[in-house]
Amino acid sequence: MTLQMLDSPALATPPSRAFLARAGQGARKAAARYGLLLGFLILWQVGSTQGWLNATVFPPLHLIFAALWDGLASGALIDDIAISLQRSGLAFAAAVGLGIPLGLFMGQIRAVEQALDPILQFFRQTSALALYPVFILLLGLGEASKVFVIFWATLFPILLATIGGVKEVDRKLIEMARTYGAPRRTVFLRVVLPASIPSVFVGLRLSATTALLLLIAAEMIGANRGLGFQVMNAQYNFQIPLMFAAIFLLALLGLAANFTLVTLQRRLCRWAEAT
Amino acid sequence: MRVVDTARRGEVTIRDLSKSFTLNGRRLDVLRGIDLDIHGGEAIAIVGPSGCGKTTLLRVLAGLEEPDRGDVLIDGAPVHGIGNQRAVIFQEPRLLPWLTVTQNVAFGLEVRGTPAAQAADRARHYIRLVGLAGFEEAFPRQLSGGMAQRVGIARALTVQPEILLLDEPLGALDAMTKLTMQEELARIWREEGVTMILVTHDLEEAIFLADRVLVMSKDSTTPTRLIELDLPRPRDRSTPGFVALRRRLMAEFGLH
């Protein structure tokens, strides 16, 4: 960064030309980053309207966006978004609320970690979707079983990443803090906790992806509202543009979740990026 | 705060100190009845081959290890565990990567209960002392190895210990940086008036910094020896006295 600034004769060029140069550079960057995605969308649109693709399965983009707009304007899709956000949000929040504190605790106390690890590994390997019928039997076909299956699937990535983060804290840093007379609590708050944050975020991002996956599956199986339901329902009713509109919203939801987590991580882990 | 007789500040007495480890079922006597008197404000270097127990001795002095037998007395009082009179400088800087230089240097004080603003003030003083002015807000990963080690040294000095324990503090630095840092350490020791106990495998470093050198050996038949370094300060590596001492110390290790 510094080197570039030294190299570019910023003082010699008039401001307008510098501005143009900067705008050109920005455009090139955007093209390199989003060019392929744009090409894919154009190909879809052209392919669909020209008949290279089966237009009933892959309707042109303008129809999909029209369906999306209709759904949003009439409030039907808004309802679906709200209920889907509520289900995944509740489950994710519960998984964070339980997984991070439990992971911090388990990672510090070897005996607890060793006793619980086999059962955790066993639960983790048991697909949450396979357990969904069990949850339905226990909690009914309502909201509780849906939230619980998402919670179940999102808990383990968070829990295991947090345990891993705590266990991998550099012992030498802990020893350093101890030589200054730091009590256990201080060592935990000032060394173990900040050192585990990057690893916790790995778990959070993994869990956010899992939450959306399980959300869709749960809504496809036994729901009458929600984005996952809408994808299935639109397909049954052969409203293919609406189906793609719901899929598009789900993708957007995933991107938004990831973006939020990445931004939060950047803010909390500014030190890891400074060069 | 205990009132300490100023004449005895930083005095370390080691009495019959022994420690052994069990390694693969075999007992390993690392320290065998060590006796040593270190005066307040003295600089002493501990040298010896790998595995002779010099780092173990330092860790016992730091309170990170408990001896099997014997006592460590500081200013006449027996000590166990970690205490405020001592600060340790490790071979690695051991900085907290999420804290800036100032926050790292203030860490020791904050842990001991000094208010943050006051700790930061004191930290800035020692950052200047180790020659890092202008880097107060930098993060550890932006620093070179030598700079990071200076931060570690400043952190130890900030708590104003009576005794500074250094475990091969310059061992990981390149030759050029090492020479500069040895001069820095000599200056800091002179200015701060602390007792300095330095473990090193660099004989020249020992002669450059110490008043006395404790030579430890690996086998139980050879006793530990104490060599007086009667050289004027500041020391100059090229004086005949320095060269003669280096030759003598190397002969202790069978090197010529």
Image (tube, helix red, strand yellow):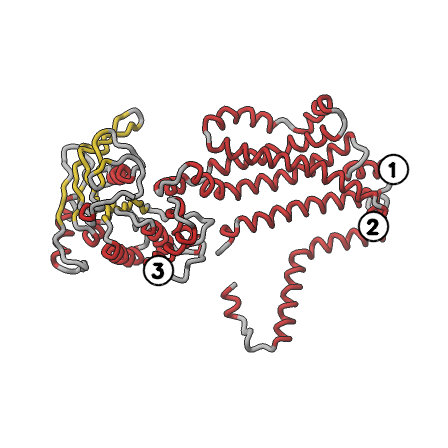
Q: CA gap, disc 3 to disc 2?
A: 63 Å
Q: Nearer the viewer, residue A98 or A239?
A: A98
Q: Chain of mark 3?
A: B
Q: CA gap, disc 1 to disc 3?
A: 74 Å
Q: In this figure, which residue is indicated by the disc labeled 1?
A: A237
Is residue B200 at all visible to an observer of this figure? no
Q: Residues within 10 Å of mark 1 (few under 14, many from 20)?
A: few
Q: Who's the residue at 72% across and 47% down the image? A: A252
Q: In this figure, which residue is indicated by the disc labeled 3?
A: B128
The quadrant of the image that shows the N terminus of chain B is top left
Q: Who's the residue at 48% across and 56% down the image? A: A275
Q: Amino acid at mark 2?
A: Trp
Image position, residue A58 (x, y; %) = 82, 46
Q: In this figure, which residue is indicated by the disc labeled 2?
A: A69
Helix, strand or loop for disc 1: loop
Q: Amino acid at mark 1?
A: Asn
